[in-house]
Amino acid sequence: MLKPQSKNKNFTEESKQTVLDVFLQKGPLADWLKLCKYSLTPRTYEMNVEKLLLAGCLLVNQAAHVFVNDAFKTPANMFIALLGKPGCGKTTIMNLMRLVCDAANIYEIPTGSPEAMEEAIEEYRDGIIFWDEAGELVEKGSDYLQRVRYLLNKLYYLNGITRKKTTRKSVEIKPRSYYVSAVLGAIEDDWNRLISHWKGGFERRFLPLRLKKGRRMFEREAPRSEAVEAVKSLAGWFKPVRNGVFAVDFTDIMPVLREVGSRLNVPEEYETAVEEYSLFVLSAMLVSNVLAEAGRGEDFRRKIRSHGHYSPRGTINSFVTLSDYNDLYIVTYSDHVTKIFDEKLGEHMVTIPVVTLVTIVTRLVASCFTDVNVEIRESKVLEILDRIRSRVEKGVKVVSHKTFVREIIRIGNANIYRGYVKFLEDAGYIRVLHGKRGKKVVLDLDAKICGNCALFGSSLCHNVSPGMPACKDFKPLEEG
């Protein structure tokens, strides 16, 4: 869970609503949410609106070819995983994204063998990969999965792709000469099976959007006429920027980003992912707002230059090598002043302090990685208990936390193994000790060792190792 940012309980919801009012009342993100609202069931939309916003950010970044204007010119293409139970709306959301892509001339990169995908990327250069079911990927086998993982890792950073002619034609794709995002749909079990094959943290390339099931039995999704208008409107926003690149500069607000980030209670293994996706989402929201303020029409480019800094053709190659694109727009952040409409006040100006926007976005992104409901399976618990029993019978009473996770629990996903560790500890099967030399796990709770002593770790304890035989001052832990 994340630490609260303010003692005022209304801070988060009130400031979040202000951000939504400003950024989502007009522009491509507003039209994307409108499309979702009039295509999904009311409960599904209401229960998942924040996750839908994040999915819309992928569309904005893909359509406008958004980069973070840092020293590395980091691409803001996004990989998202739509996770949830059957009927929660995964397939519908992916189909809505496909509708937008078709209307805005964004290619769908066909899935298949990694070699075929490389050839499609070389041809199209610009598009989104959709995998409707992660379960299909898992069934392909470990060799296929590793080849896909290798390709996706290159696509995430827009690295160069080179393949000399083998059974298929040669492929030569220069770095940053293409722009590709990815959307994957899966039930939680299939996602866990998939990332167990993609060890080494690759699953953290994906932003997991866990959807809640809002549709009731026999309640059908029926897109309304407003949804059709939203698709047309999205095409109107995206088509004028298809030949451009947007670079979002966060130099002026980096101190705020660091300050807000320091207050997030995020596990270390997710810090980089939260940092990257917070910048990607902020970039999409700022670009969406720039487009909304500039409007559409023949004078679009003239208007957009007044809301950002424009660089003519010729400077683009020093930024990225998307050689087919003509325009480069640099978007900077200042405390946002923009027009919104309120039923009571009419049209009025609202200022969004940077700290408010950054706090809301970083908390939202961090929650995607940290708020996970882990289903504890009895069969898995029995397997773990068998391994614990086997260790104890061999005289092993204490192991490091790392050994416990890798060799006894055998689950790679941090959120999931934490759920099992907590369950086993709460049920009285193990004891987790926190010390200066790292965490230890006591497997034999009946052994007369320091780790089972009530004095262990206190000023009255003389030992530093929980596995050492207890001394004469041993004091058993009180039960209950």
Image (spheres, rainbow, N blue to C red):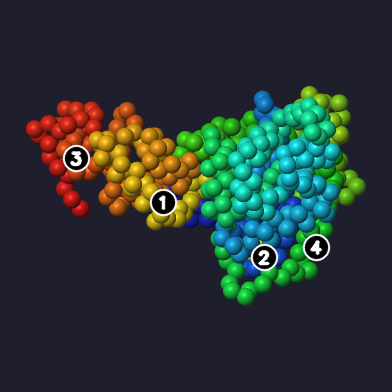
Q: In the shown orientation, is residue 442 left or right of residue 162?
A: left
Q: Where does the image place residue 43, in percent across and percent down from the top left?
A: 59, 67
Distance between the alpha carbons at the discs numbered 4 and 1: 49 Å
- Label 4 crowd bin: few (<14), some (14–19), many (20+), radius 10 Å: some
Q: Residue furthest left?
A: 472
- Identity of the amino acid at label 1? Lys
Q: Secondary structure at mark 1?
A: helix
Check disc 1 and report the residue beneath it. 380
Residue drawn at x 62%, y 49% as measured from the top left: 139
Examine the rendering and report whether any part of residue 299 can be seen: yes
In this picture, is 229 found above or below 282? below
Secondary structure beneath dot 4 equals helix
> Disc 2 marks which residue?
40
57 versus 306 height, above or below:
below
Q: Position of residue 438 (x, y in %)?
A: 34, 31
CA gap, disc 1 to disc 2?
Answer: 36 Å
| Residue extending furthest toward the right | 298
Query: Is the residue 250 above or below the residue 215 in the image?
Result: above
Residue situated in front as seen by the camera: 72 or 250: 72
